[in-house]
Amino acid sequence: MQSLIKFLAIGSGLIAISANAAGPLQSVTLQWVKMPLEYHLDGVVEARQQATISAEVAGKIEMVNFDIDDFVERGEIVLKIRDQEYVAQQKRALAALDEADANLQDMQLEFRRNEDLRSKKLISQAVFDKTRANLKAAQARKSSSLANLAQAEEQLGYTVVRAPYSGVVVERHVEPGETTSPGQPIMTGYALGQLRVSAYVPQSIISGLRTHRSARVVLLEDGRSLEVGKITIHPFANPRNHSFPVRLDLPEMKNDLYPGMLVKVALTIGSTERILLPQKSLVSRTEVNAVYVLDDAGQLSLRQVRPGNLFGEQVEILAGLDAGESVALDPVRAGIEHKRQLDSGL
């Protein structure tokens, strides 16, 4: 028996399809699927970790190594301040420590000698007490010298400003040749990939969000969904619009989102039942969507439907189909079979 050959026009060419060679027509039986009930609103991307580096010491800026939009690795040198004065302070502190250490050693020797003499009752108690007091004073001077050296080395270290974390520079506040003062802003940046979304949730649905603690972020560019990690709900509402500020932490990512971008936020506030259909089953022509429905007798009919939101490769059917009905998975083959049934009067 010859295979039934049909031709379907697609674009400017013809595709030959053998109805018999491809086997029986595959279909799917529709069912109600329990899914989260979502509320959609706008959100704005912001950095989870953003900071402004400030100067810790005063001095003339010798070098600024990065500018706006530069990527900085953690620990890289961002800026250098002239350090001659702080090197001199360190040297003075080292010299004072050497002097205090030498004095302490002399006092320790004197204390041990007098301790031996006192045990033999060759010196008075007053002389021995004075020796012990001198030893404690020498120990205190050494401790003070150590503290001064640590402070001088810390000040010297502040002349080299390093990035506290890896990130992108968003603002540069100084130029080489300027003189800094403690607390003066130097550079602002944010940690790349560590982002969150900020949104304002209406009072009417905040209870559902608190209960389910689930949400996803939808990218406007390609419709991709990102699962949200931590959800932070502020404990009080904005008295002007009665909405609650909510922060949604995003997973680590690279070069997909930047602070200030607009996204859609889908908040889970309950559950609902939907009829889902593989998107490939839809026949779409301009604004009309339809599917081929298969009845119990194997007869096909083309029926218009109203699709809703996409869930991966599945599409929600809002109207036109009921649970229990069967839909052809391959609309091309189903169209050929439907025409054959009409031609044969079945």
Image (cartoon, helix red, strand yellow):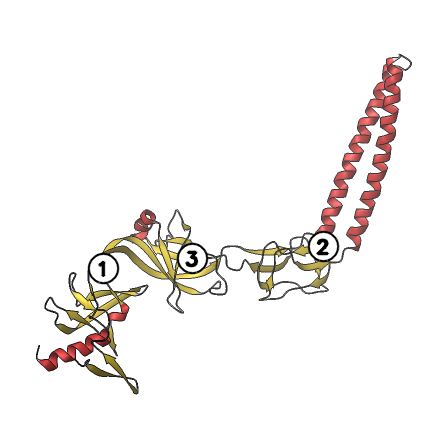
- In 3D space, how far apart are the residues under numbered discs 3 and 1 (Cα atoms)? 29 Å
Residue 21 vs 153, above or below: the answer is below
- Judged from this view, the residue extending furthest toward the left is 345
Question: Where is the N terminus found, in terms of image quarters?
Answer: bottom left
Residue kind at label 2, given as amino acid type: Thr
- Judged from this view, the residue extending furthest toward the bottom is 12
- In 3D space, how far apart are the residues under numbered discs 2 and 1 (Cα atoms)? 63 Å
Residue kind at label 3, given as amino acid type: Ser
Residue 337 vs 241, above or below: the answer is below
Q: Residues within 10 Å of mark 1 (few under 14, many from 20)?
A: some
Q: Residue at x 32, y 49 (%)?
A: 212
**Closer to viewer: mark 3 or mark 1:** 1
Residue 167 in percent (x, y) is at: 57, 59
SS at circle 1: strand
**Closer to viewer: mark 2 or mark 1:** 1
To which quarter of the image does residue 151 belong?
A: top right
Q: Residues within 10 Å of mark 3 (few under 14, many from 20)?
A: many
114 displayed left or right of 280: right
- The circle on residue 159 is 2
Residue 97 in percent (x, y) is at: 82, 39
Residue kind at label 1, given as amino acid type: Arg
Circle 1 is placed at which residue position? 274
- Judged from this view, the residue extending furthest toward the top is 121
- The circle on residue 198 is 3
- Precedes in sequence: disc 2 or disc 3: 2
